[in-house]
Image: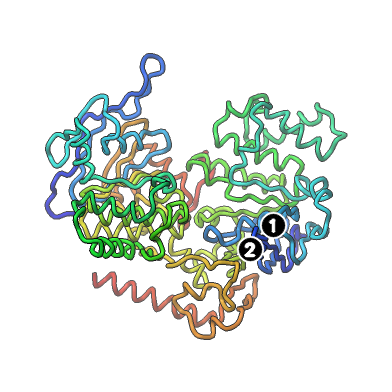
Amino acid sequence: MSNPVMLEVKGLTTKYITRFREDVYAVDHVSLKVEEGKSLGIAGESGCGKSTLALSLMGYYFPPLHYTSGEIIIDGRNISRMDPDDIRRDILGTEISYIPQSAMNALNPTQKIISFIEDVVQAHEPSRTKKDIHDLARKSFEVLGLPAEVLQKYPVELSGGMKQRTVIATSVILSPKVLIADEPSSALDVTSQKMVIKMLKNLLEHGFTKSMIFITHELPLLYNVTDDIMVMYAGQIVEKGTAQEAVFDPLHPYSKGLMGSIIVPEYGLRDVELTAIPGVPPNLKNPPAGCRFAERCKYVRAECEANPVPLHDVGGGRAYRCILSERELRDFYTREAHMREAHQNAG
Amino acid sequence: MPDEKNLCLSGSGLTKVFGFGRQKCVAVDHVDFNFYEGEIVSIVGESGSGKTTLAKILLGLINPTEGEVYFQGTKRDIGTQKKKKEYWKSIQAIFQDPFSSYNIFNKIDAVLLDCIHMRGGRRLPRAEKVALMTEACSFVNLKFEELTNKYPFELSGGQMQRLMIARIFLLRPQILLADEPTSMIDACSRSTILGMLMNLHFETGMTLIFITHDIGLAYYVSDTIYIMEHGKFIESGTPDEVILHPKEAYTRRLINDVPKIHEEWDLSTV
């Protein structure tokens, strides 16, 4: 633990209040830590709370999303109970920055890119002169491999991938401590996706941002980008570990299922049998009392449905949320692998 | 792979040109292919390579500027609306966006009943029709009792895409054309949908044509892969030939641009 912690979250819980006054806890006691220079990936199906977590981490809540409890500490500064206006002025953009999937839609079609950047900088640092901002923009575009001509163009003149990269470059222009990228490349084709990913990795390496949280359901992408991976299910963390561990040696049955659905064009894929998890995530209006995955789990037991399952810490930064021991789970997985192999040889 | 190869769908010199003069755009450029019965084919290319235009030509939705489509060895004739309807009994499609695939004013029963009627089951007793619909729904893990009296927009994206497969199950066409069937759903539901399509293929022996930009998916499912660039098929062959030993630079680039898990992903090439 040599690096300083950039983002620390302790037991963060946030809820949506629906128009029928029902509480939906979309982020439920989430704790995490990201050190300087590191990136954390968040994986999970659609509807399991990934994006809500991203929104909650900014500390800037607007209805129907409401803060319930927990702490968000950015580089030693607790922002969890700050006034929304203060957060907007002092935190967003300078301490924590957010890139949504459709980031490119943030651009104003009637404004040149440079005046968009001017607006962003002046909103936080009103004393900066235009010339100063231009120099700053040109310098960071150069390091990030974006042509400087882009600054003088209108958004319609740029391709989707270029717009996305422009907005990403703008979001880190004030060197935030944490960058949250929520599916930044899902709307793009593979080549633009690769450019965006390369850029995000550059951001970390060149210190444009001190740490990064990357959210996607594309596991191969996550594996290639981040140092650690956290798997979410129904608002809770079900597994934490390094990217290597989470992809090649998952413990929780849900993560195991997710990793079984990876499709990549490389040798040996055609011999792998894809696994699918049957069913859908539970409705969080009235979540199950016990394990939230119990309904869809192959290894479910009577005890699973009785009490909430705590996150079981294995040490070395690894944790999983299941009542079965590491040993039992691994036994299940090896037995299944053997059975599949026997089945394949027979067929 | 099928034992004896019967031609199912083939094309010679298929070309589609949009616009004229300076705005001329050749979307599909002299494409030749032979798809055999029971084969799983993938057509892979980036956006703008002409995949979807080719799909529309195959479906008979737009006419090619040049070239001919042959269906089961004979020239396809879809000159009149009646002949077109007859042709659509043998070829059906699943599109990328399930939300826009349904008539929003028709309830789910109407969607499925239509399929039964198309197969000539108009005069079946109601109970038999319900039995057929229930069977189709259970094939895709949906419960028919929960769906009756619902409108398409009340379902989730994954459910709608599965209902699309239930339609195909009832229609039993000889050819199913799937245009980006999984690009709008997450990785986990993707394997569910793929599993269902594979079951359907296994049960009915239909020819499956995948149109996709997902080269991993193409590698996983197909018997033959065609790579499309600027309206031309530049490379084709078995998945192992095309993906593991690509000949064209374009194919190599497509493969390199996708993140891998066992091999190093080279980011320096963009």
Q: Amino acid at mark 2?
A: Ala
- Residue at (11%, 52%) from the top-left corner? B4
Element at label 1: strand
- Residue at (40%, 42%) from the top-left corner? B252
Comparing A217 with B189, the one in front is: B189
Comparing A343 with A201, the one in front is: A343
Label 1 crowd bin: few (<14), some (14–19), many (20+), radius 10 Å = many
Comparing B159 with A112, the one in front is: B159
Q: Amino acid at mark 1?
A: Leu
| Residue furthest out toward the right | A127
Same subunit, labels 2 and 1: the answer reads: yes
Label 2 crowd bin: few (<14), some (14–19), many (20+), radius 10 Å = many
Residue B1 visible to an observer of this rendering = no
Query: Which residue matches tag 2?
Result: A26
- Relative image position of residue A263 (x, y in whole percent): 42, 56
Query: Which residue matches tag 1?
Result: A65
- Residue at (64%, 61%) from the top-left corner? A20
- Relative image position of residue B58 (x, y in whole percent): 26, 37
Mark 1 belongs to chain: A
Location of the C terminus of chain A by quadrant is bottom left
- Residue at (12%, 37%) from the top-left corner? B74
Location of the N terminus of chain A by quadrant is bottom right
Q: Is residue B40 left or right of residue A255?
A: left
Q: Is residue B45 left or right of residue A228?
A: left
Q: Quadrant of residue A270?
A: bottom left
| Residue furthest out toward the top | B21
Residue B18 visible to an observer of this rendering = yes
- Relative image position of residue B3 (x, y in whole percent): 14, 55
